[in-house]
Image (cartoon, rainbow, N blue to C red):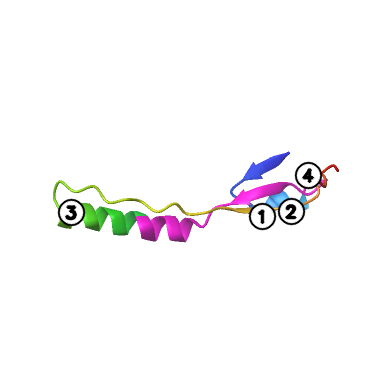
Amino acid sequence: MVGFDDIPEAAYLSPPLSTVRQDFDEVGRRSIGLLLQLLEAEGTVPDPAPVVPTLIVRGSTAAPRT
């Protein structure tokens, strides 16, 4: 089982919950940058670059099977 947002409580569950962490500060920075590009270049749609999430592996996920 995997959660999302990496809230602090996830580490204290039994078993600790694996989770996906998003860098919301980076998402905000890129969003503002895209908005400014849209405002400056009327009619041009900027190409958004994805923010890659991080998988935090804890006890709720098993090791890969071989």
Q: CA distance from mark 2 to mark 4?
A: 13 Å
Residue at the spot of label 3:
39
Question: Which is closer to the viewer, label 4 or label 1?
Answer: 4
For image coordinates 40% across by 54% down, the residue present is 49
Give the magenta range.
13-30
Give the farthest residue toward the top: 1
Question: Which is closer to the viewer, label 1 or label 3?
Answer: 3
Mark 4: amino acid: Thr
Q: CA distance from mark 4 to mark 1?
A: 17 Å
Q: Position of residue 33 (x, y in %)?
A: 30, 59
Residue at the spot of label 1:
8
Label 3, residues with CA under 10 Å away: few <14, some 14-19, many ≥20: few
Q: Is residue 31 left or right of residue 50?
A: left
Q: Position of residue 50 (x, y in %)?
A: 44, 51
The magenta stretch spans residue 17: yes
The C terminus: image quadrant? top right
Element under label 2?
helix
Element under label 1?
helix
Element under label 3?
helix
Q: CA distance from mark 1 to mark 2?
A: 6 Å
Residue at the spot of label 2:
11
